[in-house]
Amino acid sequence: MGINVDLSVKIGSKTLPNPVGVASGTFGYGSEYEKLLDLSCVGAIFTKAVTLSPRGGNDMPRIIETPSGMLNSIGLANVGVDRFVSEKMPYLKTLPCAVVANVAGSTEDEYHQVVQKLEATDGLWGYEINVSCPNVKEGGLAFGTDPKQVERLTASLRKQTARPLIVKLTPNVTDITAIAKAAQTGGADAVSLINTLVGMVIDVKNKKTVLAAKTGGLSGPAVRPVGVALTYRVCRAVSIPVIGMGGISNADDALQYMLAGASAIQIGTANFIDPQAPHKVLEGIREYCERNKIETVGGLRSLIQ
């Protein structure tokens, strides 16, 4: 007789029903998938980025397939926080899963204004802070490349909300553990990683870059070994939960992250290929735990050193 596996994951003061989330930018605002997937199997939807003002995104073309992955330069296209609250939240708050707003900005003040507006609405489980955005007041370098900026931004946002605060880390740094520690010191309840790797594709026939923005973010199976390695490092550098992502296509991929120390995972590019991927991954994690007599998903983190 199989054991009853506890799939819940505690982050900050709240609990996710299970460890399988869908990554920001790959699942829209949830309604795009409602006829393709039973959303009750999703632990959390991480929404498209929410910025202070609406963004049209980068020029076309802004997405291309690469070997074992894809490159995108969408440019944080979104409806802006006011329309997110008025047009998207009424639907999102009806969903059976947790809803986490991915928050982005080009200055610290923009992050604050977005969170302030979101705090006034109910139905949100928490926030994922995208620190891969360029800080226009600091010469355009991404917030997430400077530990001091990450700590300061996290600490100031911590004062604004009691909801779980998750800082999403970029892999495009020398030492990702320094950034993770800064987020923890600033009061983050968790960190999520990895965001996409910077990449470029060149059309050799026409002698020009394929993407209009020249570079884009690499995601998909090609980045999984990088994501697992960085997750392993970060899990041993901080005491807060880590949410792993990058190239997860099936349960074995997800289990690699969880065995590396992640408390939860996010599925991104795989949603475009198989909308049923979150359900299949969740059942695969459950079956693995049952087979190995692991009573809680948290028990996976202690299996390797």
Image (cartoon, rainbow, N blue to C red):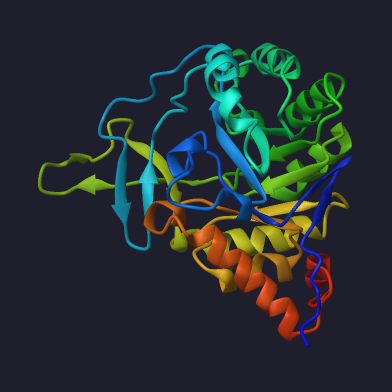
User: Closest to the observer: 226 or 82?
Assistant: 82
Indicate left or right for 305 with 247 as reference: right
Q: Is residue 58 above or below residue 4?
A: above
Q: Quadrant of the N terminus?
A: bottom right
Query: Which of the 4 image quadrants contains residue 6?
Result: bottom right
Indicate left or right for 273 with 46 as reference: left
Indicate left or right for 93 with 207 as reference: right
Q: How many numbered discs sit on the rendered protein?
A: 0
User: Percent from the top left, x then y, of residue 47?
Assistant: 57, 35
Query: Which of the 4 image quadrants contains residue 91?
Result: top right
Asked whether residue 175 is in view, the answer is no
Residue visible at 72% across and 85% down in the picture: 291
Q: Is residue 89 above or below residue 7?
A: above
Residue visible at 54% across and 67% down in the picture: 280
Q: Is residue 186 above or below residue 53?
A: below
Indicate left or right for 269 with 125 as reference: left
Q: Residue furthest bottom?
A: 1
User: Percent from the top left, x then y, of residue 208?
Assistant: 19, 38
Q: Is residue 248 above or below residue 300?
A: above
Residue visible at 72% across and 38% down in the picture: 167
User: Percent from the top left, x then y, of residue 283?
Assistant: 61, 69
Query: Which of the 4 image quadrants contains residue 303?
Result: bottom right
Asked whether residue 60 is in view, the answer is yes
Q: Quadrant of the C terminus?
A: bottom right
